[in-house]
Amino acid sequence: MHTTRIDQSIATWRKSSHSNGGGGCIEISEQYAHVIPIRDSKNPDRKHLTVPRTAWPPFVTAAVNGNLTR
């Protein structure tokens, strides 16, 4: 297991190029070797979700296919 501290104030965040500006966007930071931090673009100062880099492709696939649930 890798432990990576994420300092949101120095992370480089980006929105998807598919973002339509409708307010339901997330931002990710790809600068870390082992994790992908994810945050709500409307609330950037709130805590972020961090997923292992290996889990990112299945997460994106599930999101695209509408298979994510609350």
Image (cartoon, rainbow, N blue to C red):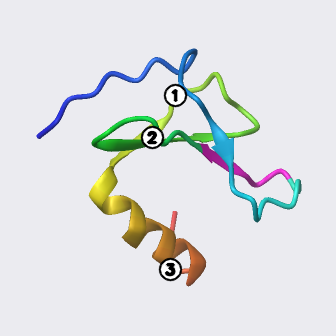
The secondary structure type at the circle numbered 2 is: strand
- Residue 26 lies left or right of residue 61; in this view the side is right
Q: Which residue is mark 2?
A: 49
- Asked if the residue under mark 2 is in contact with the one under mark 1, i.e. CB atoms within 8 Å, the reply is yes
Up-down: is 27 above or below 12? below
- Residue 44 lies left or right of residue 63; in this view the side is right
Q: Which residue is mark 3?
A: 67
Q: Quadrant of residue 57?
A: bottom left
Q: Quadrant of the N terminus?
A: top left
Up-down: is 18 above or below 13? below
Q: Quadrant of residue 16?
A: bottom right
Q: Marks 3 and 2, how far apart in space?
A: 18 Å
- Residue 16 lies left or right of residue 62; in this view the side is right
**Residue 68 can be seen in this image:** no
- Residue 10 lies left or right of residue 22; in this view the side is left
Q: Amino acid at mark 1?
A: Lys
Q: Which residues are magenta?
A: 23-27
